[in-house]
């Protein structure tokens, strides 16, 4: 840190983080009416998130119940992500929450850390929805694995096509502002309060629509990349052995992952983590959140009195032209160099 060049880079990153915060504040804008494409374009142009309260309140999906979903999906199988609950595996990033997948986990067999993906199984929908409901509502709460329907493969127009009619096929004011023809994917998320998604970012413009229950977002702008301690980590997948014990199956793939958790800020921090000013926002049934591409986000959830939490998100391709993508890649590289 004593070399003039190193000190100069360090100071430049600090100035980037703090100047952005000073100019933009630490609140997520809230709209009470659906914006026009031109009005919404102001948020897209600035790359700032916003919540549109009640924008989806008239959608039939906001009235979903377990009974209704069971009837609509009767006899259908879905892809379910399963992870262990309370297993003795330690996360490097302190991310061992209720759903300990898509997180950094120390494998006791080889003493290496992995980005762990959930076990994915094909399951009858009725069995899945009853399981997560009972896990949420029964008292005392039953122990067991955490299950989450989270296939990010356009599943609402695929395995959940019976439910597609209960939501809008598009978000036209957003699509026009993004300058694209159609959403690249429409994903349905169903789980209970035990499911937590660790800090990450996506290369999509995201319109996140809450249908049942609530979601709790922690957001960081791309300017805080140097705060999140992004590391290249080997992948592994949860598996069950012949004795139904959980194991990690290492893979050859290596992915970037944010080791720092804004809810556990003293662990795995970088020299810049203390500068982070996370934005926090809750969305409830009928609300929409615009989550700009490349914003870091961590998500937890609360259930309705049905014992479930359901959301639908529309992914639109981000614009890789212009300065936005290139400048974000530059920030990412500089942050990595400064931390190494």
Image: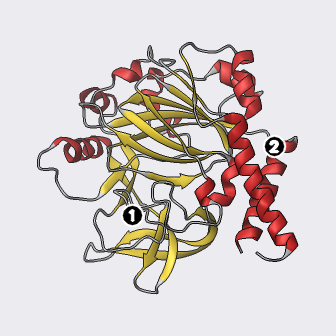
- The answer to whether residue 277 shows anywhere in this view is yes
User: In x, y percent, where is residue 160?
Assistant: 44, 35
Q: Which residue is mark 2?
A: 324
Q: CA distance from mark 2 to mark 1?
A: 33 Å
Please identify the quarter of the rendering in which residue 51 is found: top right
User: In x, y percent, where is residue 43?
Assistant: 70, 27
User: In x, y percent, where is residue 201?
Assistant: 61, 50
Label disc, if present, on residue 167 of the rendered structure: none
**Relative vertical location of residue 256 with respect to residue 281 in this rendering, above or below:** below
- Callout 1: SS: loop
- The answer to whether residue 180 shows anywhere in this view is no
Query: Which residue is pictured at 28% across the width and 41% down the height?
Result: 129
Q: Is 184 situated left or right of 269 in this image? A: right
- Callout 2: SS: helix
User: In x, y percent, where is residue 283?
Assistant: 45, 30
| Colour convention of the picture | secondary structure
Q: How many marks?
A: 2
Label disc, if present, on residue 96 of the rendered structure: 1
Query: Which residue is pictured at 70% across the width and 48% down the height?
Result: 18
**Relative vertical location of residue 94 with respect to residue 293 in this rendering, above or below:** below
**Relative vertical location of residue 160 with respect to residue 172 in this rendering, above or below:** below
Position of the N terminus, as image quadrant, is bottom right
First reached walking from the N terminus: tag 2 or tag 1:
1
Query: Which residue is pictured at 48% across the width and 63% down the height?
Result: 103
Please identify the quarter of the rendering in which residue 58 is found: top left
Of residues 69 and 173, the one nearer the viewer is: 173
Q: Is 66 situated left or right of 30 in this image? A: left
**Relative vertical location of residue 152 with respect to residue 237 in this rendering, above or below:** above
Of residues 268 and 298, the one nearer the viewer is: 268
Q: Residues within 10 Å of mark 2 (few under 14, many from 20)?
A: some
Query: Which residue is pictured at 64% across the width and 35% down the height?
Result: 25
Of residues 265 and 137, the one nearer the viewer is: 265
């Amino acid at each position: 840190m004593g070399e003039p060049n190193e000190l100069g880079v360090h100071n430049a990153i600090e100035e980037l983080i703090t100047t952005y915060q000073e100019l933009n504040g630490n609140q997520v804008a809230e709209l009470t009416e659906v914006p026009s494409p031109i009005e919404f374009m102001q948020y897209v142009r600035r790359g700032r998130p916003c919540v549109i309260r009640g924008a989806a309140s008239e959608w039939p999906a906001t009235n979903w119940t377990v009974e209704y979903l069971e009837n609509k999906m009767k006899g259908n199988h879905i892809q379910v992500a399963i992870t262990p609950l309370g297993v003795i595996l330690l996360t490097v990033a302190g991310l061992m929450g209720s759903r300990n997948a898509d997180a950094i986990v120390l494998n006791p067999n080889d003493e290496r850390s992995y980005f762990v993906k959930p076990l994915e199984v094909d399951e009858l929908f009725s069995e899945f929805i009853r399981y997560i409901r009972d896990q949420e509502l029964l008292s005392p709460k039953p122990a067991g694995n955490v299950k989450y329907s989270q296939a990010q493969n356009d599943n609402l127009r695929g395995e959940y096509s019976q439910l597609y009619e209960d939501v809008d096929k598009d978000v036209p004011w957003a699509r026009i502002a993004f300058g694209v023809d159609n959403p690249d994917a429409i994903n349905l998320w169903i789980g209970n309060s035990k499911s937590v998604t660790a800090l990450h970012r996506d290369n999509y413009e995201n319109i996140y629509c809450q249908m049942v229950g609530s979601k709790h977002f922690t957001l960081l702008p791309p300017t805080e990349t140097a705060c999140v301690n992004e590391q290249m980590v080997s992948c592994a997948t949860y598996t069950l052995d012949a004795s139904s014990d959980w194991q990690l199956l290492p893979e050859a793939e290596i992915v970037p992952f944010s080791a720092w958790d804004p809810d556990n800020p003293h662990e795995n921090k970088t020299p810049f983590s203390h500068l982070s000013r996370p934005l926090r926002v809750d969305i409830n049934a009928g609300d929409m959140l615009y989550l700009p591409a490349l914003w870091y986000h961590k998500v937890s959830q609360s259930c309705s009195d049905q014992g479930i939490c359901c959301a639908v998100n529309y992914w639109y391709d981000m614009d890789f032209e212009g300065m936005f993508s290139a400048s974000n890649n530059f920030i990412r590289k500089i942050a990595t160099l400064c931390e190494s």
